[in-house]
Image (spheres, helix red, strand yellow):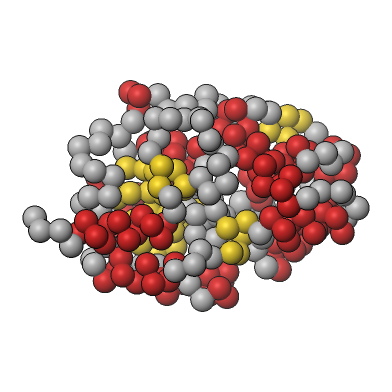
Amino acid sequence: MRRRRSGSQGRIRPDRAHPLTVSLFDDVDLLSLDAGNTVIFLDHARLAALGREAGHDVTTEQLIACEGVAKRALGGGGAVVHVPWSNDGAPGARGWGEVMATAFSCAGVATTALPALLERLWESHVDHNLYSKVPEGFGAAMDALRASGVKIAIVSNSEGMLEELFTKLGILRHFDAVVDSAKVGVAKPDARIFQIACERTSTTLERALHLGDTLATDIEGAINAHMRVALIDPFGHYEGRIADVPRALGVVEAANDIVARRALPR
């Protein structure tokens, strides 16, 4: 086991911020969305149940809080727990494993028990993604947004299974493109993954807005690509932190705001 720190310092340097010459939700041609905890949310109750099945006394509330600890650690705000396990080298699995290991370590699981726990969690994750809860009103909001002329792309560091998961959840039809890092060979915060989304939707970075829940990948990545960006923070994981990053209540609310602004007279 080793604990590492991310290269990010946990805050966005003002000199790197995209110059916001228009309102966050004005003149948007592409809504770029992270997947986990933006479109599909982590099922903390299921995660806790899996932990208890493996013999660990963890609660849903602990894992909600400890997921925040893991996300902040990956953004440079603490130590990331990394342990060797069989799928560590699989596409998307390393970052996933670090989030899970750091969260469960925070919740009191012994380091020696983490590799076996990751194996059990991964098995369940592959069977049915642990990130699988869709916000109420999501489909209608996305359909209205696309009807207004805005393209929608998923840009996610994932394991290559997103399209299959979205099909299972009945939401794949709401997107114009799904850019899964495991399939395109580049991951956030690399700006190239956002450029791929623009190429696939015939849009430009200058008229794109990215929404995501993680500083180290979503916020840093969108800034690297010189896009507008807003943080989705449904569980208050960044409460009182990174005040220089705009917030969005959620993807449904953001989509409705964009539609409303596009309907205003010019």
Can you see residue 196?
Answer: no
Tell which residue pokes out farthest to the right in this image.
55
Q: Is residue 155 above or below residue 164?
A: above
Residue shown at 78%/50% (left/top)?
Answer: 59
Q: Residue 198, image x and y in percent?
A: 31, 54
Q: What quarter of the picture does the C terminus occupy? A: bottom left
Residue 96 in view (yes/no): yes
**Residue displayed at 67% across by 68% down:** 128
User: Residue 195 vs residue 128: left or right?
Assistant: left
Q: Residue at x 76, y 30 (%)?
A: 2
Which of 79 and 91 lies nearest the eye of the viewer? 79
Above or below: residue 247 compared with residue 122:
above
Left-right relation of 158 to 118: left
Viewer-closest of 188 and 263: 263
- Where does the image place residue 102, in percent across and percent down from the top left? 72, 39
Residue 70 in which image quadrant: top right
Quadrant position of the N terminus in the picture: top right
For the residue pair 182 and 106, the one nearer the viewer reads as: 106
* Depth check, front residue: 1 or 175: 175
Which quadrant of the structure image shows residue 131?
Answer: bottom right
